[in-house]
Image (spheres, coloured by chain):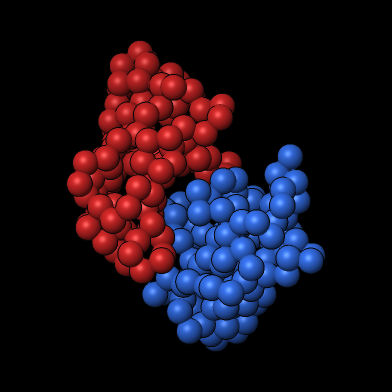
Chain colours: A blue, B red
Amino acid sequence: EVQLVESGGGLVQPGGSLRLSCKASGFTFSAYWMNWVRQVPGKGLEWVSRIRNDGTKTFYADSVKGRFTISRDNAKNMMYLQMNGLRVEDTAVYHCAKSDHFDPWGQGTLVTVSS
Amino acid sequence: QSALTQPPSASGSPGQSVTISCTGTRSDVGYSKFVSWYQHHPGKVPKLMVYEDDKRPLGVPDRFSGSKSGNTASLTVSGLQAEDEADYYCSSYTDSGTFVFGIGTRVTVL
């Protein structure tokens, strides 16, 4: 069974940093592009970033470009999202999702940016 | 990267059909055969219902169908059932190598 488990969320002040992790199991992690998607509670979905299966290409939403960095460790079946310069508007539940079909999604980890 | 346009709400009685539109531009919806649709029940994670414009993943009922014409994609839910009441989001690959989601449509079964 494919499983994605996110961790690393929490409360951080504006301007602060957090590193999110996504642990994958149940599939050949190194064969798939992976994505991060976020949802502000009660609001819609926003695509954040994607990374090629070998980690050599990355893409970002304009809203996070220059502040967030996506990476992966295929030996550990892990994907990461380093978030720097956090803003109040980055407050959301962050989900990792397998492949460019976003199937399936992890349960998500809540990031709250507040002073 | 503007969000794709979806109607905020749609509704139908059990057994009826409802169609949700998803309008973008030639740089996203109209760019390639890569529009997906997701069903999202509150408190759960989004579930893929349609991918690559009109394909259904294994296990998704054939009551759900996708189509596309130009810069507008559509999801039709036929034979509405109570459990179909949820939020539905479209997403599209773009010519910049990024993705964009629609604003979401709340489907109500009357």
Q: Residue at x 27, y 40 (%)?
A: B68
Numbered circles on residues, count: 0
Residue at 38 percent of width and 57 percent of height: B93
Residue in the picture at 48% in, 23% down: B61
State whether residue A92 appears in this view: no
Which residue is outermost to the top?
B15
The residue positioned 35% from the left and 47% from the top of the image is B33
A2 and A9: which one is in front?
A2
Write down the quadrant of residue B95 in the picture. bottom left
Residue B12: image location, x then y, percent: 30, 22
> Left of B37 or right of it: where is A37?
right
Left or right: where does residue B96 sit relative to residue A92?
Answer: left
Query: Which is more toward the observer, A90 or B2?
Result: B2
> Is residue A42 in view from this perspective?
yes
Q: Residue B53 appears in which quarter of the rendering?
A: top left
Please state if A83 lies on the left or on the right of B39 as rendered.
right
Residue B105 at what x, y percent from top left? 34, 41
Q: In this view, does B18 lie above or below B3?
A: above
From the top left corner, tell me how far across and down residue A88 is, in percent: 48, 75
Q: In the visual, does B25 lie left or right of A104?
A: left
Quarter where residue B108 is shown:
top left
Q: In the figure, A88 relative to A21: above or below?
A: below
Where residue A76 sits: x, y (%)?
A: 79, 65
